[in-house]
Image: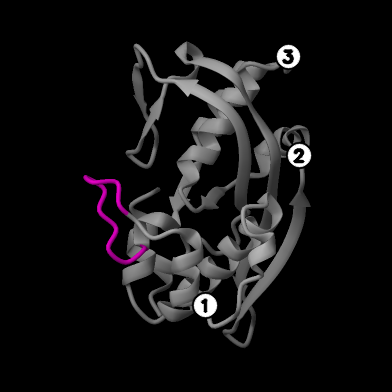
Amino acid sequence: MDMNIDKNILNKNLFFIDTECRGYIIKNNVDYMKTYNGEVYKTFERMETKDFKIYEMYSYVYKININVEGEYEIEKVKEVSNLADFIDCIDDIDMIVGYNVLFDVYAILCNIYHKDVHNKLDIINELKSKTVIDLQKYSPRYNEKNNYYLSLKDYYKIVVNEPLINSKLHTAKYDCYITFKLFLQLFINNSEEDYFFTKIRLYN
């Protein structure tokens, strides 16, 4: 295994996130800004919103390390179940991982901006500086130009050999959990190859 590739995610705080939102975003007169991963965030300060809010969010935080025997070890660091706690630990974030995760990050940015949060502009700038890994981009038949991709549920069924609990789908905690399981299986499947880690390196 190429340790120069592996080191991008080893011993890092990986924040797996999912949000469930209500309301509307009116996309008029939008400016754009580049993030570190080359993706485009819409400028949320100028977005008109109608009752747009996060009603549920969840984050599992994990670290992946290699022990003295050369085996991978997965350490759960913490769980975060609301926006306030997420803001409190924003300095601890090394990478943000999710499925269509730019939507979730955007939702968090928008909610922070429109709330009475102390030092919110500093928090926003800190969050925008984080490395983002969007697992949606690795799904089969992904087409960025046409915005076509598999759903998290369908991609999970292809990659992970475990049944889904359909009644829990589209809840932030469960979707966050299966995103972690999907990431872990991709990590295992490709740990002897350059493919997965090279893609991660593009986001640094």
Task: Give the quadrant of residue 53.
Answer: top right
Q: Position of residue 191 (x, y in %)?
A: 43, 78
Q: Residue shown at 61%/48% (left/top)?
A: 18
Circle 1 SS class: loop
Task: Identify the residue under disc 2.
Answer: 82
Image disc number at residue 160: 1
* 193, above or below 113, in the image: below
Q: Mark 2 and mark 1: span between their CA atoms?
A: 27 Å
Q: Disc 1 to disc 3, how far (Cα)?
A: 41 Å
- Indicate the amino acid at tag 2: Asn
Front residue of 164 and 44: 164
Disc 3 is placed on an element classified as: loop
Label 2: which secondary element: loop
Query: Is 16 in front, or is 123?
Result: 16
- Write down the residue under mark 3: 116
Q: Earlier in the sequence, mark 1 or mark 3?
A: 3
**Image point (49%, 46%), residue name:** 101
Query: What secondary structure is the magenta-colored segment mainly?
Result: loop
Residue 89 coordinates in the image, percent (x, y): 72, 39
Q: Residue at x 34, y 56 (%)?
A: 149
Disc 3 to disc 2: CB gap under 8 Å: no
Q: Position of residue 192 (x, y in %)?
A: 39, 82
